[in-house]
Amino acid sequence: MRESAHIVALMGSYRRDGTVDRTVKEILSAAQAQGATTTKLDLIDHDVQFCTNCRSCCQEPGPERGRCVLDDDADAILSALERADGVILAAPVNCGDVNARTRQLFERMISLVYWPWGRPGPKPRRRPHTPALLVTSSAAPAVLTRLLRTPLRTLGHMAELLGARPTDRLVVGLAGGRDPELRPRTRRRAQRAARRLLANVSRCRSKSAPE
């Protein structure tokens, strides 16, 4: 019997129990109900320093993530995401893109590319395969956030660097209230997103299983 799928969620919001946080909790709860094990990583609980752009982590070739010169929690966070059967990348929209805390980790993910000095551009270290669910929220209507595209594009780039393939997106609009209680429709969408993520994990496992 195969082990249960392990889903790892990265939650980049500054607010505990805000809209994005509650949406992620709903997704993880639904995944657990389907037999998955889950881990939730809240960036506000971790020490992630600013990238110094020294590019030391980009110099050695190969599929493994380059070693960063900074000693903080970024390595453990990225390792947990890389080991997951499915990932959830979640962050709110601030000033037209994901919030700065999430982008701070995004910059540290340069260790996931090979980019030695003298090379004109970076080369990803791995091909995307792990299913990824992208989650964001905005005070604007959801349709405007989708049309803006930038937040989902940033989360998508993060997924691809991790070796994950964005297979689903969940945008929660009108999220600027003081009490961010999830609407019933949002709960149902989160539950459906969990089921789709696990279905994508199952398909990915089937493709990678030996003949």
Image: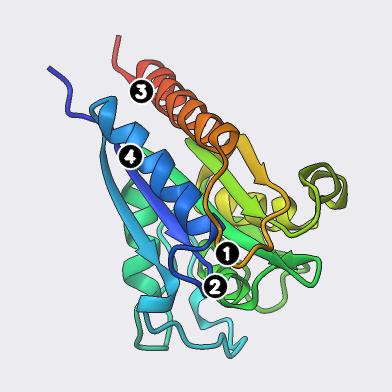
**In the figure, residue 84 lies in which quadrant?**
top left
- Residue placed furthest toward the front: 179
Q: Considering only order in the chain, which callout, 2 or 3, is on the residue closer to the N terminus? A: 2
Disc 1 and disc 4: Cα gap in Å? 37 Å
Instruction: Name the one closer to the observer, 7 or 163.
Output: 7
Q: In the image, what residue occupies the spot 40% across and 58% down?
A: 64
Circle 1/circle 4 CB separation < 8 Å: no
Q: Nearer the viewer, mark 1 or mark 3?
A: 3
Q: Is residue 91 left or right of residue 6?
A: right
Q: Considering only order in the chain, which callout, 4 or 2, is on the residue closer to the N terminus? A: 4
Q: Nearer the viewer, mark 3 or mark 2?
A: 3
Q: In the image, what residue occupies the spot 78% across and 68% down?
A: 120
Circle 1/circle 2 CB separation < 8 Å: yes
Disc 2 and disc 4: Cα gap in Å? 37 Å
Q: In the image, what residue occupies the spot 60% across and 67% down?
A: 178
Residue 58 disc label: 2
- Residue 69 rendering spot, x and y as whole percentages: 42, 87
Q: Residues within 10 Å of mark 1 (few under 14, many from 20)?
A: many
Q: Considering only order in the chain, which callout, 3 or 1, is on the residue closer to the N terminus? A: 1
Q: Nearer the viewer, mark 2 or mark 4?
A: 4
Q: In the image, what residue occupies the spot 65% across and 62% down?
A: 177
- Secondary structure, mark 1, is strand
- Residue 16 rendering spot, x and y as whole percentages: 44, 69
Vertical position of residue 191 compared to residue 103: above or below: above
**In the figure, residue 3 lies in which quadrant?**
top left
Q: Residues within 10 Å of mark 3 (few under 14, many from 20)?
A: some
Residue 29 disc label: 4
Residue at image mark 1: 114
Vertical position of residue 60 compared to residue 7: above or below: below
Circle 4/circle 3 CB separation < 8 Å: no
- Residue 8 rendering spot, x and y as whole percentages: 36, 49
Vertical position of residue 42 compared to residue 52: above or below: above
